[in-house]
Each structure stands twice: as structure tokens, then as C-alpha cells.
Amino acid sequence: MTPELVLWIGGVFIGVAVLCGAVAALWLERTAPERKRLLAVAAPAGPGFVLEQRQLTESADPTLQKLSKALPRSPQDMSRLRRQLASAGIYDLRAAVIYSLAEITLPLLMAGVVFLLMGLGSGWVLMLLAAVVGYLAPGLWLQRRITLRKKSIQNGLPDALDLLIICMESGSSMDQAIAKASEELGISHPAVAYELRLITTEIRAGKPRMEAMKNFAKRTGVDDVRSLVAMLVQTDRFGTSVSQALRIHASNARTKRRQLAEERAGKIGVKLVFPLALCIFPGVYVVCLGPAVVAVYRTLM
């Protein structure tokens, strides 16, 4: 066995072992009997959810803290990564460590698989490409998830505003309306419902409502949410009608959603050019011109 083979096998083994250990530790902690009993005691009587305190505070796991210090990321980078994960709907702070480990181990794993399949002599280019793909794959997955979640929140925001208006006009306060809307939107718009639950949790923990709304805008990164929060801040400052402001904003958000749908529909014609040119037209040319070409060939021969 050559030294290069031993080195690659050892690197792949270490990377897979670290990744499997992190996943196993997370799974064992989530399935612990003590944890299940605590969640059962803390669960509300009606429909709702349990928000873990560890999602809002720093992780107290000493193993993950040691791993986070050993990772080639500064505290500022880890904070930025946690904000990106929050924008994707992943609020567990342990996910940042697992994501960083995946960025390190996945390139080694993919390069090792290519090496075991093709060897070092003829497959080093593919090994390099596999390592690059393994390094870029977590980032692409995260950006894709952030984009999809932003679209989900933007599509569900008008319905959430309508529910808030109905609740407030029926006599509920702003906090009660947010809590009620989070319960009603759990099936149709789960991303919006989860964010509203976070707002309710922060308010119940003693944070001012406007600060909780600003955190909502920072977490999501959606332009409509930012404008909504800015409008609510101005409404709270000047004492104007909140329900009327929400109704106007809901109408604007619904108009924007309809315009985006019309824009996507208008782009369909342009997007169909490449599939038609590359997939359909060649087959049509073969069917239409094939017999004529065969006839001309037989005539000339």
C-alpha cells in the first residue's frame, strides 16, 4: 500500500468519523428520555409549539464549544453564519458548528470516493473537481434554502396581515393578534407562523414589541417585512391607527405579489427558447428533413 493511499484513506476516515460523531451526538441529545419528559411537561395544553431556550441563547454543549474554537472561523464569521442559518429557518446554534464541519469533511469525503473509484494516476482532476463541489455544495444549499424561505414569507405575509386586522378589529391587542395569527397560519404558511411565534416568545420574555419586530425583519431579510416593521414603528411613534396601516400595507403586498406573478409569467416565453432550440427543434428537423435526405442520398448513390 502506497503512502498516498494511506494518507487519503486516513483523511477520509477522520472526516467521516468527525461528521458521524457530530450527527450522532445531536441525535442522542434530541432522543434523550430526560429531554422528552421536560418537553412533555413544558408543552402547552392547546395547539402550539415549544421553543427551546437554547435556540435563543448560546449553546452550552462543551463539546460543540471546543469544536467551534477549533474550526477555522472567527467569532464574527460564526455570528454571520448563524444569521444566515436563521434566515434559512434554522435557529439551532449547533447547526453552525455542524455546517462548518460539513464544509471541511465533505470535500475530503467526495475526493476520497473519487480516489477509491479511479485512483490517483488518472483521477486527480476529478478528485479536485469533487473537492471543489463538496466545498461549494453546503453554501449553495444554504442560499437555495434562504431564497425559498424568503419567497414563502413574502407570499404568506398578506394573509398574515389580514388575520392581524381581523383580530385587532374584533377587540384583541396587537400581541394577542400576533399570537392568534401564529396559531392559524401553522398549516398554510408555516414559515410566517414560526416567525410570529418567535415574536410572541420575545415579547413574553420581556422584550419591547418594536424591538421584537425589528428582530423579525433582521432574521428574515425580506423587503416587505422591513417596510412593514418601519411602518409599525412610525405608527407606534405617532399614535395612528394600526389596523388601517396594516390594511394599506396588506393591499400593497398583495399588489406586489400579483405583479411578481405577472413578471414570472412574462418571462416564460424567453425561458422556453432554449428548451425548444436544444430539445424540440432538432427532433422536428430530423422528422421533417430525414426522409428527404435519405431520398437524395439514394438518388445520388
Image (cartoon, rainbow, N blue to C red):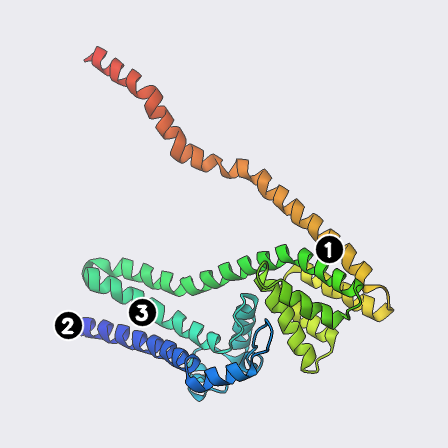
Mark identifier at residue 108:
3
Of residues 49 and 275, which is closer to you in this image?
49
**Residue 250 disc label:** 1
Quarter of the picture containing the C terminus is top left
Where residue 136 is drawn, which disc sits there? none
Instruction: Please provide percent x and percent y for residue 104.
Output: 38, 72
Q: Quadrant of the N terminus?
A: bottom left
Based on the displayed image, in which of its 4 quarters is residue 128 positioned? bottom left
Q: Is residue 208 left or right of residue 193?
A: right
Asked whether the residues under the numbered discs 1 and 2 touch, taking CB atoms below 8 Å apart as contact, a structural biologist would say no
Give the residue at x 63% y 71%.
Answer: 197
Q: Amino acid at mark 3?
A: Leu
Label 2 secondary element: loop
Mark 2 belongs to which amino acid?
Answer: Thr
Work out whether mark 3 precedes mark 1 in sequence or the reverse, and give the earlier one: 3
Q: In the image, which is nearer the foreground, mark 1 or mark 2?
A: 1
Residue at label 2? 2
Front position among marks 2 and 3 = 3
**Residue 288: image location, x then y, percent:** 35, 20
Give the residue drawn at x 43%, y 79%. Answer: 30
Which residue type does callout 1 highlight? Ala
